[in-house]
Image (cartoon, rainbow, N blue to C red):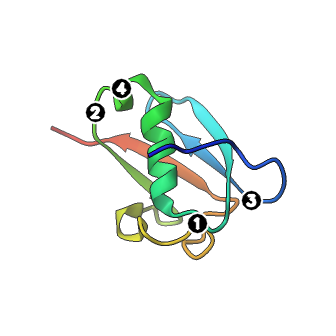
Amino acid sequence: MDVGVEPSTGGARIMIRMPDGKRLVRKFNLEESVKMVYAFVSQSHDDAKNGKEFVMKAGFPPKDLISKVDDTIQSSGLAGDSVTVRWKED
């Protein structure tokens, strides 16, 4: 899935904390699905590019976002939020 270019105006800013401590910040269109955030993460880290599986959690207490993968970023409440990425255990 191609994440395309970051919107220049409007959109939802999401901070993503990677397992190695790196932080990524990107804007997404509010009507894009949470799946787009998963795609961005999988294309932004070498381990994820090589197929290493990960989980994304947001909110307090942190909840796995996989159940919201088809929801929009706006309806899932991710606009302006931070997301934590963890590698799946083998």
**Alpha carbon distance from label 2 to label 4:** 6 Å
Callout 3: SS: loop
Q: Quick one: SS at disc 1?
A: loop
Q: What residue type is labelled 4?
A: Asp
Q: Do the residues labelled 1 and 2 touch (CB within 8 Å)?
A: no
Mark 1, residue position: 73
Query: What is the crowding at mark 3: few (fewer than 14 residues within 10 Å), some, or many (at least 20)?
Result: some
Q: Which residue is disc 4 drawn over?
A: 47
* Label 2 sits on residue: 52
Q: Residue 11 carries which label?
A: 3
Q: How far apart are marks 4 and 3 (CA)?
A: 28 Å
Task: Give the residue type at disc 1.
Answer: Ile
Residue 78 falls in image quadrant: bottom right
The answer to which of marks 1 and 4 sits earlier in the sequence is: 4
Residue drawn at x 81%, y 59% is 10
Q: Are marks 2 and 3 in contact (CB under 8 Å)?
A: no
**Residue type at mark 2?**
Lys
Residue reaching furthest to the top: 46
As drawn, which residue projects farthest toward the right? Answer: 9
Q: In this view, does 56 lie to the left or right of 87?
A: right
Total of numbered circles in the picture?
A: 4
Of residues 60 and 12, the one nearer the viewer is 12
Amino acid type for the residue under numbered disc 3:
Gly
Cα distance between the residues tagged 1 and 2: 24 Å
Task: Determine the residue positioned at 47% across, 66% down.
Answer: 61
The image position of residue 27, as x and y in percent, is 70, 49
Q: Residues within 10 Å of mark 2 (few under 14, many from 20)?
A: some
Q: For marks 4 and 3, give the one nearer the viewer.
A: 3
| Left or right relative to 8: residue 52 | left
